[in-house]
Amino acid sequence: DAGVTQSPTHLIKTRGQHVTLRCSPISGHKSVSWYQQVLGQGPQFIFQYYEKEERGRGNFPDRFSARQFPNYSSELNVNALLLGDSALYLCASSRDPRSGNTIYFGEGSWLTVV
Amino acid sequence: GESVGLHLPTLSVQEGDNSIINCAYSNSASDYFIWYKQESGKGPQFIIDIRSNMDKRQGQRVTVLLNKTVKHLSLQIAATQPGDSAVYFCAETDSGGGADGLTFGKGTHLIIQP
């Protein structure tokens, strides 16, 4: 079975632009979460979606938004990009968001803002 | 949520020796803990997890120990191999439906000496 898949793997954007990152969860997983990982640090929680509804949000500005589709895939959108948004964006999936369900990560999307 | 921290940023061990990576957490409501391995340029890879109703859990060459009294978590890797070189993160969450996502520490870089 395929793991969590993310696209694109690498992209370069200019400051002020917007970006859309995509994620397909593991088959059978209905919960998708997004994380930002800056070089040298651990991942930081951005959003969690379950059954197409936002279930949790981390401490990120409103420039960050996401959604989950009926097939449980998800998009992360970031508007008005700043240089500080350069990071590895990770998607994770689990069967449901309840504590104890194993959470698997994709390989991430590397975003560079210039 | 509160932060999860690691005691050592870098751990160097001889190939074949056992490795012990430590983690301290501060959120007393945390009830589910996960260890991830992250190789350079890749997403976090699930290693092993443990729920708060357990003190110890074993996998293949890995053991996780949980001490709730002092809020301490450790990962033991037996007979360390070159392929174990990576950054290891502990992560925690509580029972609140995962709405706060996983909280990660900064990571420990495990270096294997030949």
Image (cartoon, rainbow, N blue to C red):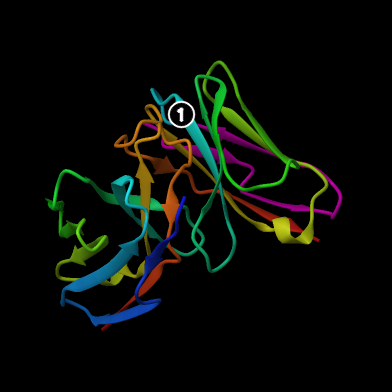
Secondary structure of residue under mark 1: strand
What residue do we see at 46% from left, 28% from top?
Answer: A31
Is residue B33 within the magenta segment? no
Q: Residue at x 32, y 38 (%)?
A: A102
Residue B84 screen position, x and y as percent:
29, 67
- Tell me, yes or no, whether the highlighted magenta stretch contains residue A6: yes
Bounds of the magenta span?
A1-25
Q: Nearer the viewer, residue A17 or B41?
A: A17
Q: Quadrant of residue B64?
A: bottom left
x and y percentages locating residue A91 in the rendered image: 52, 41
The residue pinned by badge 1 equals A31
Disc 1 crowd rating (10 Å Cα; few below 14, some 14-19, many 20+) is many
User: What amino acid does circle 1 point to?
Assistant: Ser
A16 or B23, nearer to the observer:
B23
The quadrant in which the C terminus of chain B is found is: bottom left
Name which residue lies at 59% across and 61% down.
A38
Residue closest to the eye, B1 or A35: B1
Residue B109, how many percent across, how many down?
39, 73
The picture quadrant where one finds residue B6 is: bottom left
The chain under label 1 reads: A
Residue B72 is left or right of residue B96, and the answer is left
